[in-house]
Image (cartoon, rainbow, N blue to C red):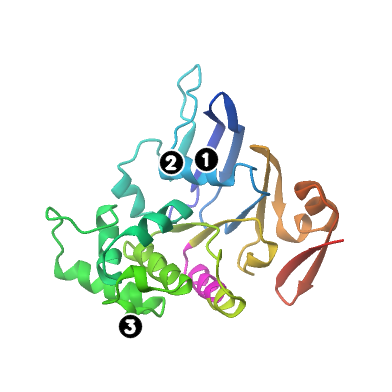
Amino acid sequence: MDTTTPLLSIDRATVLRDGRALLDTLSLDIAPGQHTAILGPNGSGKSTLVKLLERRVYPVVHDDRSPVVRVFGRDRWNVAELRSLLGVVSSDLRREFEASNETAGNAVLSGFFASMTLGLDHHVDDAMRTRAREALERVGAAHLAQRDVSTLSTGEARRVLIARALVHRPRALLLDEPCAGLDPGTRRRFLDLLGELAREGTTLLLVTHHVEEIVPAIEHVVMLRDGKLLRQGPKHELLADEHLSGLFDWRMEVERSGDFYGARLR
């Protein structure tokens, strides 16, 4: 893996909607292997950042036409090719996934084609089927392959979406609020899975507003507020009372249990 080229490089990204800046001249660099939590309150720009990386929204073009967003050193990507390096599990993807009429196995296979369903023009070969089966086994969801996705629990669906992202064996995973709707036990098992993927070499980019979802492997924290970069730095420095209180505009107290952090309102 090339460790000199940033996994992600954003240069003064501004994303507008109805004249309002959802992202406001945001600049950010993340290195390969730099497991990162992108933390912020609702409305901070987290989801817009995810959509920017997914190519669902586009930034204002610089006057000098220089690239605003580079992923793995490139600013132009075919979406299917990008997915082979950067797996995505986002809220938009979850909604599309839950509305599909596919089996879980076919939904995983559709990841090879950057679609949510298998079309008549999609040729699935034996190698793809093997990798899809391996990905489902990797996340403990092989037994769900023949289930209709509409019948899956939230936790089961999340595992299948992770498997879909893993079929390419991507170098990084972008996870947007991946634990939303999970009960405490299912959430912990899911976070343990993310920790295993990190130890195996997959870079984690975790987008959340829950401190307790930041797995031990993540050591870098980026804080967003009002579409801007508020601060970034090591986890042990930023997950502190004063920084979280400033981020969420509420007095907060940080707690630590082993390698996990938590926060509560004062």
Q: Secondary structure at mark 1?
A: strand
* Residue highlighted by disc 3: 143
Residue at (52%, 62%) from the top-left corner? 178
Say above or below: 202 vs 64: below
Residue flagged by tag 1: what amino acid is it?
A: Ser
Residue 138 is situated, as x and y percent measured from the top left of the image, at 39, 77
The mark closer to the camera, 3 or 2, is: 3
Question: Which portion, as a residue range, is magenta?
Answer: 190-202
Quick one: label 1, few (<14), some, or many (20+) residues within 10 Å? many
Query: Which residue lies most toward the top here?
Result: 63
Q: Earlier in the sequence, mark 3 or mark 2?
A: 2
Residue at (39%, 65%) from the top-left corner? 161
Residue 45 is situated, as x and y percent measured from the top left of the image, at 60, 41
Q: Nearer the viewer, residue 141 or 67?
A: 141
Specify whether residue 5 is in view. no
Q: Secondary structure at mark 3?
A: helix
Specify whether residue 107 is in view. yes
Quick one: label 3, few (<14), some, or many (20+) residues within 10 Å? few
Say above or below: 91 vs 163: above
Q: Quadrant of residue 189?
A: bottom right
Residue flagged by tag 2: what amino acid is it?
A: Gly
Residue flagged by tag 3: what amino acid is it?
A: His
* Residue highlighted by disc 2: 73
* Residue highlighted by disc 1: 9
Q: Which mark is residue 102?
A: none
